[in-house]
C-alpha cells in the first residue's frame, strides 16, 4: 500500500520507524544498566488534597540519564514492560515509597497513605504478594498506609485471577486504586464486583470540565456511583481554579494536579508540607 502512495511516503515511514527503534534500543540498554546497578532512578511525590489539605500522595518515578537526559516514565515504563525489567523497577518504587513514607511519619512530618503505580505485568507473575509483604516488613510501614494504583488494563487478561490477587492484596490490609479510570473498559462491572477502595478519574474527563456540560454530567454520575459504593474518588490532572471549583461542587473527593502542586522531589515535598502547615 505504501508503495502505491509513492516512494517518498514509504521512505519517510521506514525512516521514522527506524529512528524510533534506535531510540528504544538506547533506552533499553540504558535501563538494563540502571536496573543492574540498582541506582539512577529518583522518586518524586505529588500530593492529593481535600479542602486544601494534603490527604495522601503518589510516588512517581524519575530517570535522568547522563546522555539521554530526562526520560519520561511514559516513554520508558512501556519499554521496561516489554523487556521484563518492570518487575525490578516497580519493586524499587514500592520499597522506596514505603521507606520514605515511614520516615516522614517517624519524623512527624506527615501521616498519610502513599500510592505506588504497579504495572499490569505483575498480575501475570507470582511475585507481587511477596514483594508487597517484603516492602512492608522492611520499611516497618503499616499496610493501611500503602495504596496500589493499577489501571483497567490489568483486567484484560484473566480477570478471575486478577480478582483473586486483588483479594489477597486487600487481605494484607493494603488499599487498591483504579488509575486512569474511564480510559479503558468494563469500569462499572469492576467497581461493582471488586473490593476496590478508590478510583482516579482520568485527566481527559477533568480537563476543561468547567466548559463542558457533558463531561460534568459524566463525572457527576461517576461520583454518585462511587460515593454510593463508599469508594474514594480522586480527580486527576486538575490544573485550574475553575476545574477545581466545579469538581468540589459535584461531590466529595480528593483533587490532584498542577493547580496544587506538580510532582516534587523529597526535599521539594518537605518544603511544600512546611508551607502547608505553616511551620
Ligand atoms: P499516572 O499514574 O496516571 O500519573 C499521572 C501523570 O500525570 C504523572 O506523569 C503526573 O506527573 C502527571 N500529572 C499530574 N498532575 C497533572 C496535571 O495537572 N496536568 C498534567 N498535564 N499532568 C499531570 P508522570 O510522572 O510523567 O508519569 C506518567 C505515568 O508513568 C504515570 O501515570 C504512571 O502510569 C507511570 N509511572 C510513574 N511512576 C511509575 C512507577 O514507579 N511504576 C510504574 N509501573 N509506572 C509508573
Ligand atoms: Mg498513578
Ligand atoms: Mg493516572
Ligand atoms: Mg492519567
Image (spheres, grey):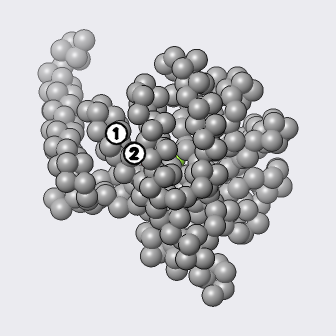
- Which residue is at 64% across, 62% downward? 112
Residue 222's image quarter? top right
- Which residue is at 82% across, 50% downward? 251
Does any atom of ligand 1 lie closer than 8 Å to the CB of label 1? yes
- According to the picture, the residue beneath numbered tag 1 turns out to be 86
Q: In the drawing, does residue 94 fall left or right of residue 55?
A: left
Tell me if residue 148 comes above or below residue 15 in the rendering: below
Tell me if residue 36 comes above or below residue 22 in the rendering: below
Residue 23's image quarter? top left
Q: Residues within 10 Å of mark 1 (few under 14, many from 20)?
A: many
Q: Residues within 10 Å of mark 2 (few under 14, many from 20)?
A: many
Does any atom of ligand 1 lie closer than 8 Å to the CB of label 2? yes
- According to the picture, the residue beneath numbered tag 2 turns out to be 90
- Residue contact between numbered discs 1 and 2, judged by CB atoms under 8 Å: yes
The answer to which of 139 and 149 lies nearer the viewer is 139
Measured as percent of width and height from the top left, residue 72 is found at 35, 52
Amino acid at each position: 500500500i505504501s508503495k502505491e502512495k509513492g516512494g517518498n511516503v514509504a521512505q519517510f515511514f521506514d525512516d521514522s520507524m527506524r529512528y524510533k527503534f534506535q531510540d528504544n534500543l538506547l533506552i533499553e540498554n540504558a535501563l538494563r544498566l540502571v536496573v543492574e546497578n540498582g541506582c539512577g532512578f529518583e522518586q518524586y511525590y505529588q500530593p492529593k488534597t481535600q479542602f486544601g489539605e494534603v490527604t495522601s500522595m503518589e510516588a512517581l518515578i524519575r530517570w535522568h540519564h547522563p546522555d539521554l537526559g530526562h526520560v519520561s516514565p511514559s516513554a520508558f515504563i512501556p519499554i521496561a514492560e516489554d523487556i521484563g525489567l518492570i518487575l525490578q523497577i516497580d519493586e524499587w518504587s514500592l520499597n522506596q515509597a514505603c521507606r520514605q513514607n515511614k520516615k516522614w511519619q517517624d519524623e512527624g512530618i506527615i501521616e498519610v497513605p502513599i500510592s505506588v503505580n504497579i504495572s499490569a505485568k505483575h498480575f501475570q507473575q507470582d511475585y507481587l504478594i511477596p514483594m508487597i509483604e517484603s516492602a512492608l516488613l522492611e520499611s516497618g510501614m503499616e499496610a493501611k498506609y500503602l495504596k496500589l494504583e493499577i489501571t483497567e488494563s490489568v483486567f484484560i487478561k484473566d480477570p478471575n485471577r486478577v480478582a483473586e490477587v486483588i483479594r489477597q492484596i486487600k487481605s494484607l490490609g493494603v488499599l487498591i486504586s483504579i488509575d486512569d479510570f474511564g480510559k479503558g473498559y468494563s469500569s462499572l462491572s469492576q467497581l461493582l464486583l471488586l473490593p476496590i477502595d478508590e478510583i482516579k478519574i482520568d485527566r481527559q474527563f477533568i480537563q476543561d470540565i468547567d466548559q463542558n456540560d457533558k463531561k460534568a454530567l459524566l463525572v457527576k454520575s461517576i461520583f454518585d456511583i462511587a460515593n454510593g459504593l463508599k469508594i474514594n474518588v480522586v480527580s486527576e490532572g486538575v490544573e485550574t481554579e475553575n476545574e477545581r471549583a466545579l469538581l468540589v461542587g459535584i461531590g466529595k473527593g480528593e483533587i490532584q494536579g498542577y493547580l496544587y502542586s506538580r510532582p516534587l522531589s523529597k526535599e521539594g515535598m518537605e518544603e511544600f508540607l512546611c508551607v502547608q502547615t505553616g511551620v
